[in-house]
Image (cartoon, rainbow, N blue to C red):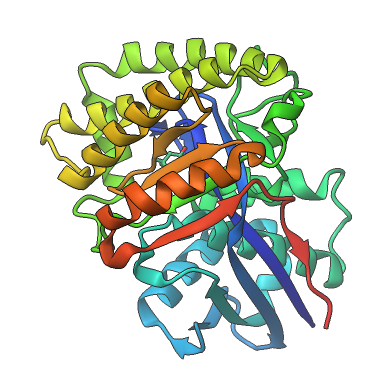
Amino acid sequence: MNVTWKSPSNIALIKYWGKYGRQLPRNASLSITLDEAHTITSVTTEKKRTKKASCSLLFEGKPNPVFEAKVQDFLRSIQKDFPFLGSQHLLIETSNSFPHSAGIASSASAMSALALCLCSLDILHGGKLPEDFFRKASNYARLGSGSAARSVYPEFSVWGKTNLVPLSSNQYALASPVHYHANFNDIQDTILLVSRSEKSVSSRAGHALMDKHPMARIRYRNAVVRLEKLLSVLTTGDWSAFASIVEAEALELHALMMTSDPSYILMTPNTLDIIQRIRDFRERTQLPVCFTLDAGPNVHVLYPYYEKRKVRNFIQKELLPLCQDNQALYDHMGRGPIQIFE
Ligand code: DP6
């Protein structure tokens, strides 16, 4: 048996930062699913005699023992829910559309693609048809990497229990939390590659530092307040309100890192320079454009497709020179994962 899924990365507008138990978020988060930045994963099953889940993995066509060991541990941790893992060895081939060192969160696309493959294979191996295939995939993607839970849906996705979104859950994400305004159709996201060096502190370690963070409580409350505001702004189409919520979230995420114990800083001088230039440009032109940040130095520039030409001119002239090798990835809101049939 063989299945292949292509699954996108996503960028959070309301951030998931802090978790408990088995990959459960301290607050609900909301993201935009991307399109260009994606992972394609193909899994072939082969009958075997041993009972423990096992896999061989090729990343970008080459063996990758570190990644393989991580995936094997993950498979063993969920083996009881996927009985076929006890009789089949998995041959996994996976590759990303973006360069490995680009500083793009590859875990969201990688773990969602893998979870989708596992859910498809389960059905092929005689497992029950789930009530909601994508909800199930989201749940297992979450166990691989929290942010991956949101990547199985198109456009906007919410992960985490909140009274603001019916049926929301800490276990899985949901699609389309609101009927959003046409101003937010096909949001553009240009990812400025400020630095391509490895992160000094992993997201996993960053989440753990939230456990004893002196501002944790206020942070989780802020996330609730901002999610409520953002859900409303998405329906009214107000880019200016959108910008102020999204930028506050991004800066709070980095403020939390800076005030963790131990403290750390992932922004670089160019990150700040870019942020300032985006704000100056917005002030000067009154154009709808803002930024968000992941757990790293790269800047995501968000703007509507109808101002694409003007904002891209600005990016090319003023921002690319501040990127490593003048590099950026031009992405936009995507339609979610697709299964590929050969
Ligand atoms: C800053 O999903 O990478 O990108 O669950 O430990 O795999 P793990 O963490 P991860 O954390 C993502 C943090 C973030 C914000 C977000 O995507 O919501």
What residue lies at 62% left-to-right and 46% top-to-bottom?
33
In the rendered image, the quadrant that contains the N terminus is: bottom right
What residue lies at 69% left-to-right and 42% top-to-bottom?
186
Residue 297: image x %, image y %?
A: 27, 48
Is residue 172 at all visible to an observer of this figure? Answer: no
Query: In the rendered view, would you say 296 is above or below 163?
Result: below
In terms of depth relative to the viewer, which is nearer, 158 or 181?
181
In terms of depth relative to the viewer, which is nearer, 285 or 172?
285
Residue 245: image x %, image y %?
A: 46, 19
Query: In the rendered view, would you say 146 is above or below 56?
Result: above
Asked if residue 269 lies left or right of residue 275, the reply is: left
Query: In the rendered view, would you say 92 is above or below 293?
Result: below
Residue 81: image x %, image y %?
A: 68, 56
Is residue 230 at all visible to an observer of this figure? Answer: yes
Q: Which of the 4 quarters of the picture holds residue 210?
A: top left
Count of all numbered marks drawn on residues in the image = 0
Query: In the rendered view, would you say 129 is above or below 223?
Result: below
In terms of depth relative to the viewer, which is nearer, 76 or 27?
27
Q: Which quadrant of the frame does ligand 1 lie within?
A: top left
